[in-house]
Every structure is written in structure tokens, then in C-alpha cells.
Amino acid sequence: MDLAYTEEEEDFRARLRGWLAGVLPTLPPRPDPLDWPGRRAYDTAWQRMLHDAGYADVHWEAAPTLRLIFLEETERAGAPYVGANFVGLLHAGPTIAAEGTEAQKRRWLPPVLRGEEIWCQGFSEPEAGSDLASLRTRAVRDGDAYVVTGTKIWTSHAEVADWCELLVRTDPAAPRHRGITWLAMPMDAPGITVRPLRTLAGSAEFAEMFLDEVRVPVDCRVGAENDGWRVTMVTLSFERGTAFVGEVVACRRVLTEVARRARADGRWDDAVLRRRLGRLNAEFAALWRLTQWNVSEAQLRGSVPGTGGSVFKLRYSHARQELYDAAAEVLGAGALDLDEEWTADRLSSLSYTIAAGTSQVQRNIIAERILGLPKGR
């Protein structure tokens, strides 16, 4: 497989790089990380700038390789990340683009691209985290609406969202993977209660969400009734396959900064630390090549990432944790200072072996779908 970029792709990179160089110095200061309304305003304003410059649709209309270049260049330039736009741009949007009707695409995709609407993810439940298919939130058909009752947890960006990509059980009698439906739920519907959850790092980008007979129009269903598990696999393939791409670039940048700091404070003389950083450098270089391979495969498959995303997600989650453990070693006592950027990132990295499917789930997917091993009994 040829992993080299074409002349057209390199032209796209050059245009994007030039635009970033001109626009980034004009941005206002970033808001306090704990100010989610402020972050929403900042992130959606950035998305609008991307839209007006012609880069907004790169996450689902552009070829996967251009998406890769976009994420690589924006991260290297220090541009704002998708932030509050994360679910809409990288999960719900690509899913609707792949599985939605033409009317659904016209309704939901343009507002996300223009930075007008924010989405949250309502998948996990208190007793359905790693085993997502055991979810219990019920949706009962009542005329032209589903009446939804249940509880969601770790609902990303629920406190500032306009829409929620929601998994519900529409047929309790069906085998658990076959009675699930994927809905787009308006967050201003009566019966929704959102309670923010504060993380170890002090932020509150997640929430509990309580649903008490919330009416969701039937035309907000993406895919067929009871076919939501298949649609969910499309969502998760984007989450595991391409959503973390920009973060690999960020980790390579952080690794360079950690090595620079180690040289400055004398810790570079520790041969064990040098070997550790060298191995991480090789690890992230390999992950970047794996990313290119996954993106190339997605292009051949019609822009939907395959199971290679699970290989990437599994290894990346652990490599990220190892990177920030090494950063803590370089910081020494400073690793306990929450004002240190690496300290907050280290705390955040602890969730990566759980988020987007636990490492145990990824190992099962790799074993069964890639290696062809039998299912456990």
C-alpha cells in the first residue's frame, strides 16, 4: 500500500498551512478550561471560521487522506481543537453522513459545519459501559414519536449540547444486539435532566442524563428501528479509527517538549529515561504509520474506518498513558502541581483505556474480527 501523499494532497496541505499562519494570530485568548459555555462559544466561533474558509466539511465530505492532513496541520500549528464540537464533527456527523436520509443530512449536517449546533453522546449507562449492548433505556413507539425513559452517564458535553446521539432499546424481547435503535434527541425536549460530573482534573465535560418520558420524533431515528447496533458500529468505527488522529500529533509534540525539558534540567543523563523516551518516539511514529494505513483503508472502504481502528485505539491509549508517566518523571515533584499542563493531561490520560471502548473490548474485537479466534464461552 502506497502511504505517500499525492501532489493534490500536498497542495491542500500548503493552502491549509498558509491559511492557518494568517488566521491563528487573530484569535482571542482561549477561555478557562472549566468554563464550558465560554468554551462552547470559542469552539463554535472557530468552527464558523473553518466553514467560511472552506474547511468545515473535511471531517465527512473530504477524502480520508485530506482529513488526516487537516488534523495533522491544525495540531502542528497549535490551532484550536474541535472541543465542544467533538461529538457532532467526529461521531454523529460522520454517522449521519453515512447512514442518514437526505432530509436528515440537510437538517443536521450544515448547522454542525457552521458551528451553530453542538451534539453530545448518550451511549453509556450506569450498568452498560463496557458492555454497551446491555443498555436499558427504553423507547416505546407512540404514534409519530418514541417515548424515552432511562438514564445515561458519561454523556459528553450534555450541559452545552443542542442534540444527543442516543441509543435506546426499542424491542426488549429481541436478542440484546438486535433491539437497539439510534436516535437524534433534541436536548430542549421536556423530561431531560442533566447533572454535570466533575472529573479528577476538575473539569465537567461529562454529565449524567435522566430521561423521563421524553418524546423524540420518529423522523429523528437514524437507520431502521432495531438496527441501531449496526449504526452504532459505524459511529464507533469513526470514534476509534479517526477521531484520535490529531491527538497522535499532539503526543509527538509533547514528547519533543518532554525531551527538551529533560535536557534542560539534567534528567537527560539518566540512561533509563533516555531509552524510555526513545521507545515512545518509535511507538508514536509507528502509530502514525498505522493511522495512515487505517485512513488509506477507509478510503478504499468508502470513508468508513475498519477494525484496524481497534488496533490503533488499544495501543494509542496505553502509549498516551506511558507518555505522561514519563512526563511526570521529568517533572519530579512538579508532577503534583495541577497548574502544570502535563499534570492535567496525565490525569486525563487515565480515562483513555476506558473511553471509546475499553482496552479489554478492543482486545476482543481484534481477537475475533481480525485474528479469527473463537468467541469466549
Image (tube, grey):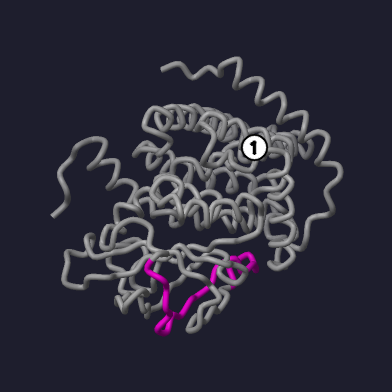
How many numbered dots are placed on residues in this image?
A: 1
Residue 23 vs 130, above or below: the answer is above
Residue 114 can be seen in this image? yes
Pointer 1: what residue?
A: 255
Residue 123 can be seen in this image? no
Q: Position of residue 58 (x, y in %)?
A: 58, 38
Span of residues in magenta: 198-218
Q: Position of residue 201 (x, y in %)?
A: 63, 64
Which part of the image, by quadrant, shows the N terminus? top left
Is 207 part of what is drawn in magenta?
yes
Viewer-nearest residue: 302 or 285: 302
Q: Residue 171 appears in which quarter of the rendering?
A: bottom left
Residue 326 vs 192, above or below: the answer is above
In the displayed structure, does residue 246 sit left or right of residue 140? Answer: right
Is 320 part of what is drawn in magenta?
no
In the displayed structure, does residue 49 sit left or right of residue 202? Answer: right
Q: Residue 356 appears in which quarter of the rendering?
A: bottom left
Residue 158 vs 20, above or below: the answer is below
Which part of the image, by quadrant, shows the C terminus? bottom left
At x 52%, y 63%, the residue is 120
Viewer-nearest residue: 366 or 121: 121
Q: Secondary structure at mark 1?
A: helix
Amino acid on which disc 1 is placed: Leu
